Amino acid sequence: MHDFQNTAWWAILWSLIKIVIVVVPLLLGVAYLTLAERKVIGYMQVRLGPNRVGFKGSLQPIADAIKLMFKEVIIPTNANRFLFLAAPVLAFVPALLVWAAIPFGPGVAISNMNAGLLYVLAIAGLGVYGIIVAGWASNSKYAFLGAMRAAAQLVAYEIAMGFALVGVLMLAQTLNLTKIVEAQAGGGFWSWYWLPLFPFFLVYFISGIAETNRAPFDVAEGESEIVAGFHVEYSGMAFALFFLAEYANMIFVSLLTTVLFLGGWYAPINTPLLTWIPGIVWLLLKTAFLLYVFLWIRATFPRYRYDQIMRLGWKVFIPVTIAWIVVIGVALETPLRAILR
Amino acid sequence: MLLAEVLQKRFQATPLTDGRDGWPDFQVAQHHLVDALHFLHDDMAPRFSMLLDLTAVDERGGQTVSERAFTLIYHLHGLNDCGALRLRVPHVDADAPVPTVTGVFANANWYEREVYDLFGLTFSGHPDLRRILLPPLWEGHPLRKAEPIRATERPAYRLSKPELQEVLKAYSDAVPTPDPGLTVLNVGPHHPGTHGILRFVLKLSGEEIATVDPDIGYHHRGVEKIAEGHTFHNFIPYTDRVDYLGGALGEFPYVRAIEMLADLTVPPRAEGIRTLLAEICRISSHLVWLGSYGNDLGTMGPAFYAFRDRALLMDLLEKYTGGRLHPQFFRIGGVAMDLPEGWREDLLTILRAVERGLRDSEHLTVGNPIFQARTRDIGVLSAAQAEKWAVSGILLRSTGKAWDMRKAAPYGLYGDLDFTVPTSTDGDALARTQLHIEEIRESIGMLRQLAEKMPEGPTLAADARYAFPPKDHTLRDIETLIHHFEQVAGEIGPPAGQVLSITESARGMLAYYVVADGGARPYRLRVRTPSFPHVQLITELGRGTALPDFIATIGSIDYVLADLDR
């Protein structure tokens, strides 16, 4: 047995087990996030949300999944068949890949890699290829408009997002996500990075909403303008993959914001009353709160026009983040360094 | 009378006297028409700035053989105290062209296309004469008297395969566009942003719109033809449905038109009840608009708040009239019955709830920074454009002109009510949203006043010859019983004559033009709806915008497709 644990086979098997442990709850989380979304937004909009399937609608996501699985995947006559089917996969795979680097506790990750932050940024940027390819392959004007918007939006937001992460990097002096969380330990709520990096915290979270194509930045879908944008021609499981990717990304952005700015698995106040609760609970609670903010924003705001989003990205977020990098850089060379680090 | 003198001297116009609405009414020969319109539009003081309506009457169906085939009817309006003016132009030969007046009034474009479509008259010099409401392959011209009223009297319509191919070509990408470099984008017929079946053929350069061609008529039900087959009373339910969000607002101009024809005096309480129902319908229509406009811009919240409150108003209408969306409560000479007991308390309670809910919707729309960013300086309408395209209602008031038929020529009980006409000078979509909200507040104020000073008395006119006879009277008095029988059996109608009745619907100036020949059915009934000129305006307003702004613009126009296509 001991020998087996040293073989390459065991390493692969153990990785697979870890992947299953992460992906299965993730997909369930996605499923129930859709239910939570419909319930929460329903509550905000004076209606009930799903309440017919199972106890108070609790089986609704299962019913939806079964429905989507059995629906026909319609491929338009003039679509590029190969790319049309590859696009949902292109969107879905990065949405899962990013989870490899996410720490759920001190050192608890599928892969506790040293360049975790870089990896996450790189993989998260790949998801938009699925959208662009879907829009192009559909050979439909509305889909194409959606794809072009998604591409323009991505360029505007990746940069600001990257700069926001640079700030975290400067304070934590590491790219390892576990170590970034550990650097925020100590004073509870006040020692988390959201305070010294407040502009980055906002920019990162808002860019995260934009990157996941959620309202008010859902111009690539733009239901009332370009009907459903890039996925207008998709049905059945092909559509479901886009859907899964979007919700997995939402959870991912919320979780990463928690890790980077909200002290990961640490309790908000450093007292034994709270610290006995396992870190994973805190991590998930904070993530759930941010997810709620996602839904709250969707229930409240109209959709931006895509050039307004670009203006926000280029003319507001990028200057703000650059300026704050300078501020943090200068502060680190002064006695403030002791407080910040 | 100066106007009459000039028209008679310069254009050999003959004054006509069978109009019952009191507007100046002249017959003008065809070769004088364009000059006369030019004069009225440019040189007359005060000017007739607006072509309110252009339509025709087929004269070949009456009992008396007429010397002419058609009469073209031009209704002008000055948007001032002088009100409307009617020009009638005889047209002898059905195949000869009529001179176009698009050179004088830009909005005549669609009206002339409609006359071409429904009457088969051609217009010489018209820039784009093709069918507008009916599909291109429709055979015949339905408003000609020779066409049967019921669809079942025509042979069943079959679309052959080659014909179908021809129709589908309009939607196909395979047909090369005549303008290289431009993408043709069909917004509609099924599109979430068009609020129903309506197709805008856009030519895009990038995402910027180079030209807009609205393809309308998908909701055409031919109410004008239907009217010719119904008695005057039977037609009332249709008027609710012309603008299906307006309900009682559509009944108002129609019953007023018939009452003018029959010279009926409506008792004050009936007028009060009509005004009450009309204002409830106006609030509910504005709420629907506010909710669906939020939805156009990607926010779902206001839709649900607005529809919640609208449901309360519909409950109220149901309690008063039995109908929720469409009261069908007006009768010629009054209303169907008195209000139920406790109507005042119900009204005041629901108004409070609506007022509270409106604050939420207001915060989520005009109070929201993204909503402001999406609507400020979007779909900007200038006063000159408003005049050019015969715009009325909130669209007109958003350009700074305080024109509201309820104020300008009070009908119902509006003359006794204290209200203001909200205006704005911005002319953009944000201003229009603001105006909708303010108008809801004004209507709530009017309803509160009505709750206070609703007149007492009968709800139907005493003259039961033309007015609808009260049922309880029919059981007591043989005279009324006979009239009731005659009216219900469809044997009696108002005396011959014609009339134009204009009211303010939720969308703008809604007018009914009725020609009666003394029979039990209207000889010709014309519905002038505000949505028709407003959608025509989009051809100009939509040009040069990007697709998201186009949706924000057409949403802010507040058209109803049934109102557009009739």
Image (tube, coloured by chain):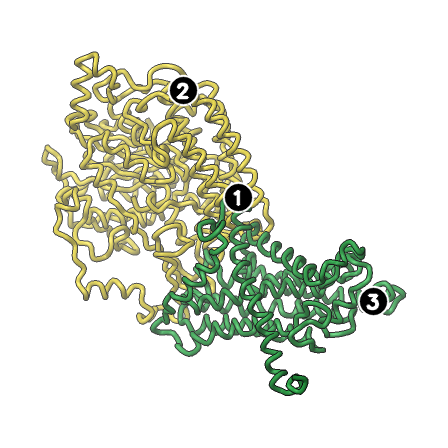
Chain colours: A green, B yellow
Label 1 lies in what chain? B
Kindly identify the amino acid type of the residue bearing the numbered disc 3.
Arg
In the image, residue B436 above or below residue B337: below
Q: Residue visible at 47% across and 62% down?
A: B208
Q: Is residue A327 left or right of residue A223?
A: right
Q: Is residue A332 left or right of residue B41?
A: right
Direction front: furthest residue? A1
Kindly identify the amino acid type of the residue bearing the numbered disc 1.
Ala
Kindly identify the amino acid type of the residue bearing the numbered disc 2.
Glu
Same subunit, labels 1 and 2: the answer reads yes
Q: Residues within 10 Å of mark 3 (few under 14, many from 20)?
A: some
Say which of marks 3 and 1 sits in front. 3
Q: Are marks 2 and 3 in contact (CB under 8 Å)?
A: no
Q: Residue B282, percent across and down? A: 42, 35
N-term mark: 1 or 2: 2
Q: Residue A7, percent across and down? A: 64, 87
- Residue B544 appears in view: no
Residue bearing mark 1? B431
Quadrant assignment for the N terminus of chain A: bottom right
SS for dot 3: loop
Label 2 lies in what chain? B
Residue B393's quadrant in the figure? top left
Q: Residues within 10 Å of mark 1 (few under 14, many from 20)?
A: many
Tell which of A286 and B501 is nearer to you.
A286
Residue B396's quadrant in the figure? top left
Residue bearing mark 3? A341
Residue bearing mark 2? B341
Tell which of A287 and A279 is nearer to you.
A279
Say which of marks 1 and 2 sits in front. 2
